[in-house]
Amino acid sequence: MYRVLIVDDEPEIRQGLRLKADFAALGLSVTGEAGNGMEAMERLASQAVDIVITDMNMPVMNGVSFLDDCRRLYPELKLVVITGYEDFHYAKAAIRNQARDYLLKPVAADELTTVLQKLKDELDQERNDRDRQAVNEWRLSQYYKEMKEHFLVQLVKEEVEPVHALKERAALFELDGWDLTEVRFVTAGLRERAGEAAVPEPGHGKGSALPERTPGKLRLPFELLTREFAGSSGERCQVLRDPSYPGLVHFILQDALTDIDRFCTELAECVAVHLGFKPVIGYSGGKLGFLRWKEGCLESLLAWNLSENAAQPPAEGRSEPGLALTEELTRTLRRLLIQGEWDAFGQSIRHELQQAFSQSRSCLVKLIFQLCLLVDGAGAEAADGDIQAQELWLYPETVHKLDSVDKAGQFLLERAASVYRTMQEAGDAEDSVIRTATQYIDSNYMYDLNLTQLARRFNYNSSYFSELFKAKVGRSFMVYLTDIRMAQATHLLLTTTLNLWDIAELTGFSNASYFSSRFKKMYGTSPSDFRQHPPEKFSSQQPKK
């Protein structure tokens, strides 16, 4: 509700004004009264007010002086003047220069209601304009761009929310309708091959002492160049980079609006002209709906791995058996790896390899790549980023040499054992699980997380996992999650002008009211007061990544 202050030296008139309009029905609330201009200024200094209804003839400080001070100190106030007919010429000048509207005494109920409704509509419009400006500023900020890309990465890696929640968050990042149109995924990267000649730096011959350029040294310029290229494609193209796989950039294209072959050709030419290397590009078939984006991204990644020198899509309309590991099997293999249960891990992957081998050589190669990605990803999560992916995709020739189930199984077991040994150096198996769990929470706090979901992710009983989490972290799951969310909320309060609804949605709280109550309980003040008068200790707080 908007707040109203009534200023008149006669108590009967103040009471009459209260009774002549249904303030609550108008979305207004009379938060105070004052008998003269000086008393009104004291109230304005101590409380927030949106509308002031004031008489002109008052003792101590008259209406003209009061209006002058209001306009100087509180220029956004909506001012309504009440005056007698005999003072109309006097009031008219003040109204022209200071006040928003005027009413003649005795004030009629319908006139007062009409003026208040008009002011309420103006305040609504101004608030909407401010909200739109805040959202526009937010969307131009680097933090917004990072959060949007994080959301895209989660869409193609995890299923952390039901579809309706995904749609709500997608709307926040200007992705409305993307789940209703078919999209294709494109994966691009510079591939290093054993024995491939490096390119001298521009302006330097072969005898130059300066280091020669190689694809591995051009990752940053490659990423910047491909992002700029994607930007030229407008709203039909989204771009993201999964930190787990440095050197690769993914594009999401609205299929109906994009000539996929032309896009890939122009992208390849752009990179070749500016960097001197021709990128390898792979793309997926059309995917409809957010729940199929993960499949699309994996398909384009595998197409990239299997391609040689140019864009090569998978066969249209063909879905080969064994192309994708199920969610349940992925969770099981991740748990077996983290806990070092090698017999079960080996039996599981051998079973999958045999099935793929019986289908086709292509299925076997694709499965090997998928299992490598799973092993590297699980290791990087469990070791809190200390394990770097071995980047096998840069040398796919190695995988093509694994032409039997025995060779592939042995290779994967050795790769997994190497990852496990590194994890063990960072702590025992349960330490690794909890470290992975906290990292998962830190990256996904904005989604609808719960203990049962997290325990299931690591194949634990929820009661045991709850006790284990508290013992290892020193806080319960819910306290840890709330602390992380509040840290992000304070950052957004201090660094953006987003409203409380947007902040609540961005930080995982169910609604603004619940967020406000939790915030006040934790910090002893409301989010709005915190934003206006932040404690010094929060002035430099940065969000977790």
Image (cartoon, rainbow, N blue to C red):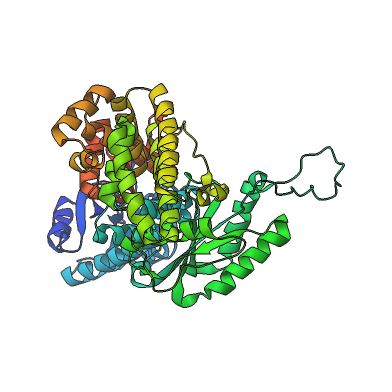
Closer-to-camera residue (202/417): 417
Closer-to-camera residue (91/493): 493
Residue at screen point 43% across, 49% down: 404
Residue 489, quarter of picture: top left
Residue 451, can we see it? yes
Residue at screen point 23% across, 22% down: 471
Total number of numbered discs in the rendering? 0
Residue 499, can we see it? no
Instruction: Point out the image quarter for the C terminus.
Output: top left
Residue at screen point 51% across, 39% down: 390
Instruction: Point out the image quarter for the N terminus.
Output: bottom left
Closer-to-camera residue (219/493): 219
Q: Position of residue 259 (x, y in %)?
A: 53, 76
Q: Position of residue 272 (x, y in %)?
A: 69, 60
> In the picture shown, does residue 134 fall above or below 485?
below
Residue 99, quarter of picture: bottom left
Q: Position of residue 129 (x, y in %)?
A: 40, 62
Residue at screen point 48% across, 45% down: 243
- Looking at the image, which residue sits at the far left? 19
Closer-to-camera residue (276/138): 276
Q: Position of residue 405 (x, y in %)?
A: 40, 48
